[in-house]
Structure formats: structure tokens, C-alpha cells
Image (tube, rainbow, N blue to C red):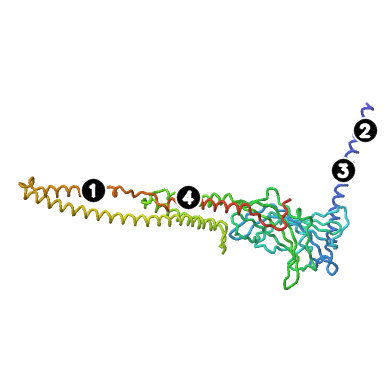
């Protein structure tokens, strides 16, 4: 009995010891967390104590260097009519502020946008931006990290609608370089300067699934730096160029193939008889109107530029071929009408001759009726009758070959056009496509690596 009681007492004592140790550890952890939170609060308070966010770092001592890089999450769409594009980016900036150095249990202080509003930040703006949006759902999409040596990382998510100057002489086989320019609004290069964080191929990175382009291929991107002068001083401007190559498939289906088929259809009229005036007129007028409609619709998706594009030249040449086919038919028809008029006059003369002969025959018939008893005796009347009959037969014989003259003969102009028009149009297509498809775009500082 005494042994059982001693074992029971030992187990209870061990349980109490374990509970005491567990509670002491929990109390120590909570105390440590309280100490850490208190420490961080004291660090932030000490950093902001006497801090003036109106003054840039290194004022009167050095130039503030802001290192930047861009991660593109979405690129596009691109508007040809307005000559602009839309881009969604994570815009990162790094700079050093000695006033924010600290010593604590952590090397990095991860903070949000509330702290960013209390310290100095670069006044970066986009030079060619038409409209920029900073995302605020569900909270402002901003990140701030402060390192113990005073280096700051400031990241924000932006959607920028920027200008993209386009030269459309080679449209739709054209290439473009859309710039994104940014820099300081108030500080000149002697106060704040910008640098790329990494090398040219890594400072601007595009996500693998970031392209939102239907008519373009994103060939690559390049970065640069330039200085602009204004009345208030010289400013550093960072530039990132996105190089685009247009896809031609849509325009081949919507414009080029219909134009080629319309030209071929206009040349079918060369194989019709020149007397088929209604059919050839329908071919000519219909194809001309079709080309007019195609030329108007092809311009709807383009800005109203004052110069001709590659597609305009193609449509103009196709229009010239179609209109030439209509003029060719008018020429052939003109000469065909002259031939009919000449042959008609010949027939009228022959009919007049036949009428005069018939009158003579009628006179002979009257003479026979009046002098019937002596008709067998009078050899002169018999001779006149035979001569009249022979003259009638000769006239008929001479007239028949002319009546057999064919009016469906092929015009020499049609014969030449059947060969000349297809050869010229085929040669034009060969030169056109060989010139534009083999034309290499001139893009400065292109870097295809990502």
C-alpha cells in the first residue's frame, strides 16, 4: 500500500513539473514577442524622430542615386489609331538614406504604404505617359523595405498608358519600338540621378505569359539612358523600348486575298466575246466598286496619316489593274461598233441593187403578160430573161459570202490582254512580296535575350 502511494505521488510531481516548464516557456515566448514588437516600435519611432521627408537624402553632400528595374506582368493592347499602348508593371526603386540606419534583431524591416508616406521618396513620373493608375485594391499595392544600412526598396504596381510613335510606311509588314520614359519631375541630374539596377537584359523583364497582343509579336526589349534639357535644368531620363513586329495573317485574309481575287475576276472578261456587252460591263463595274469598298475598309483601322502605306500601294495597283480592264473593254467595244456600222452600209447597198433588179424583172413580167402570143417567137425577150436571171444569181452569190462574215471574232486587244495582264500582275506580286517580306526592321540597341 505504501509503495503504490509513493509511485502515485511521483507521477503527480512529474506532471506538475512538466506543466510548470511548459507555462514558463510560453510566458518567455510571449514576453520575447512583446519585447520584439516593442523594439520595432521604438526603432520606427526613433527613425522618424526628427526626420524631415521634405529633404532628399544627401542634401548638400552628394547626388542621390535611384536604382530602378521593371517587371512587366502584362503588355498590351496596342492601339494603332491612337498610337498608344498599355502596360502593367511592378516598378521598383532603390536608394540609400543614411537617416534611416538602425540596429536591431532584424536586418530588414518589411513595411507597407503607411510608412512610405512618412519618408522621402523619389518624385518619379512617366514622360510619355498619357494615363497612369496606381492600384489600390484592396489596399494600395505598395511595398517598402528598410535595410539596416539605410538602403530602401520601394515597389508599386502601376498600369501605364503611354505613347508609341509609329511610322506606318511599311504597314502591315512594319515593326515598331514603343518607349517607356521616366525620371524625376523636380530634381535635376545634379541632385537626383537614375541608374538601372542590373544589366540591360535583366533590368526590364517581361513575364512569360505577359503578352496581351493579337496583332503583334513582342520581339524583345532594350534599355537606355538619356539627358534632356529644359528651362529649369538638365534631367536624367531612363528609357525602356519594347520592340514589336506586326502579324500579317489578319490582313492577308481580310484585304490582300480579296484584292487578288478581284483582279483575277476582272481579267475573266478578256475571255468573253466582245459582243457580250452586258456581261463584260457587269464584270468591269462590279470589280471597280469592290476595289473601292476594300480600299475604304482597309483604312478604317489606321490613323489618318498623310503618306501612303505598303497596303495602300498594293490596293492602288490592284485598282489600276481593275480599272484598266474596264478601259480595255471600252476600247474593244468601240472598235466593234465601228465594224458593225460599216457592214450595215454594205448590206444596204446590196439590197438596193436587188431592188433595182427586181424592178427590171417586174417590167419583164409585164412585158410577157402583154405580149404572150409572141413570147416564143421573140428571141430578144428570152435573152433579156436569161440575163436578168443570171444577174440575180450572181448578186445572190456575191452577197452570200459577205453574209457569212462572222461577228464573233476575237479582238487582237483581247488576245494581247489575256497574256499581258496576268504577267504584269504576277510580276508586281513577286516584286512586292519579295521587297517587303525580306526587309529587315532597323531597331537600335535591340536585345533579344530575356
Q: Are the residues flagged by discs 1 and 3 in contact, CB closer than 8 Å?
A: no
Instruction: Give the structural element (helix, strand or loop) at label 1.
Output: helix
**Element carrying mark 2:** helix
Given residues 46 and 189, the one toward you in this image is 189
If you read the primary sequence from the N terminus, does the residue marked by circle 1 or circle 3 appear first?
Answer: 3
Quarter holding residue 190? bottom right
Residue 261 is left or right of residue 387, and the answer is right
Mark 3, mark 2: which one is toward the viewer? 3
Residue most toward the bottom? 231
Given residues 338 and 254, the one toward you in this image is 338
For residue 342, side relative to residue 438 (left or right): left
Give the residue pinned by disc 2: 10
Q: Which mark is residue 419?
A: 4
Q: CA distance from mark 4 to mark 3?
A: 103 Å
Residue 396 is tagged as 1
Q: CA distance from mark 3 to mark 2?
A: 20 Å
The residue indicated by pointer 3 is 23
The x and y percentages for residue 399 are 26, 49
Choose between 311 and 385: the one closer to the eye: 385
Which quadrant, please, contains the N terminus?
A: top right
State the separation of the CA atoms marked 2 and 4: 117 Å
Q: Earlier in the sequence, mark 4 or mark 3?
A: 3
Amino acid at each position: 500500500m505504501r509503495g503504490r502511494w509513493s509511485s502515485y505521488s511521483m507521477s503527480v510531481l512529474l506532471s506538475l513539473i512538466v506543466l510548470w516548464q511548459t507555462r514558463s516557456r510560453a510566458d518567455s515566448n510571449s514576453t520575447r514577442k512583446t519585447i520584439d514588437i516593442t523594439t520595432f516600435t521604438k526603432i520606427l519611432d526613433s527613425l522618424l524622430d526628427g526626420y524631415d521627408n521634405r529633404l532628399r537624402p544627401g542634401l548638400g553632400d552628394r547626388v542621390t542615386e535611384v536604382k530602378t528595374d521593371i517587371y512587366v506582368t502584362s503588355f498590351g493592347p496596342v492601339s494603332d489609331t491612337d498610337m498608344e499602348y498599355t502596360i502593367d508593371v511592378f516598378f521598383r526603386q532603390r536608394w540609400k538614406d543614411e537617416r534611416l540606419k538602425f540596429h536591431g534583431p532584424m536586418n530588414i524591416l518589411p513595411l507597407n504604404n503607411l510608412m512610405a508616406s512618412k519618408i522621402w521618396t523619389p518624385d518619379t513620373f512617366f514622360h510619355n505617359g498619357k494615363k497612369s493608375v496606381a492600384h489600390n485594391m484592396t489596399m494600395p499595392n505598395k511595398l517598402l523595405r528598410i535595410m539596416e544600412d539605410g538602403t530602401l526598396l520601394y515597389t508599386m504596381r502601376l498600369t501605364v498608358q503611354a505613347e508609341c510613335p509609329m511610322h506606318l510606311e511599311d504597314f502591315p509588314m512594319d515593326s515598331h519600338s514603343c518607349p517607356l520614359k521616366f525620371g524625376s519631375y523636380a530634381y535635376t541630374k545634379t541632385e537626383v540621378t537614375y541608374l538601372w539596377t542590373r544589366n540591360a537584359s535583366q533590368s526590364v523583364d517581361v513575364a512569360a505569359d505577359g503578352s496581351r497582343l493579337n496583332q503583334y509579336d513582342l520581339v524583345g526589349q532594350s534599355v537606355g539612358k538619356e539627358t534632356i534639357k529644359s528651362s529649369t535644368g538638365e534631367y536624367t531620363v531612363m528609357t525602356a523600348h519594347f520592340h514589336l513586329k506586326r502579324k500579317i495573317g489578319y490582313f492577308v485574309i481580310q484585304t490582300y486575298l480579296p484584292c487578288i481575287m478581284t483582279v483575277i475576276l476582272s481579267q475573266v472578261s478578256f475571255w468573253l466575246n466582245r459582243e457580250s456587252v452586258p456581261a463584260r460591263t457587269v464584270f468591269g463595274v462590279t470589280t471597280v466598286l469592290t476595289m473601292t469598298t476594300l480600299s475604304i475598309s482597309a483604312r478604317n483601322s489606321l490613323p489618318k496619316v498623310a503618306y501612303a502605306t505598303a497596303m495602300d500601294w498594293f490596293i492602288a495597283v490592284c485598282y489600276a489593274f481593275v480599272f484598266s480592264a474596264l478601259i480595255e473593254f471600252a476600247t474593244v467595244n468601240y472598235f466593234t461598233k465601228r465594224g458593225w456600222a460599216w457592214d450595215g452600209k454594205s448590206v444596204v447597198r446590196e439590197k438596193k441593187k436587188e431592188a433595182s433588179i427586181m424592178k427590171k424583172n417586174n417590167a419583164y413580167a409585164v412585158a410577157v403578160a402583154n405580149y404572150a402570143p409572141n413570147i416564143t417567137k421573140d428571141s430578144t425577150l428570152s435573152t433579156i430573161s436569161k440575163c436578168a436571171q443570171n444577174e440575180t444569181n450572181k448578186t445572190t452569190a456575191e452577197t452570200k459570202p459577205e453574209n457569212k462574215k462572222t461577228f464573233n471574232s476575237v479582238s487582237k486587244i483581247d488576245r494581247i490582254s489575256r497574256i499581258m495582264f496576268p504577267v504584269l500582275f504576277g510580276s508586281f506580286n513577286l516584286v512586292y512580296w519579295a521587297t517587303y517580306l525580306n526587309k529587315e526592321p532597323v531597331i537600335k540597341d535591340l536585345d533579344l535575350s530575356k
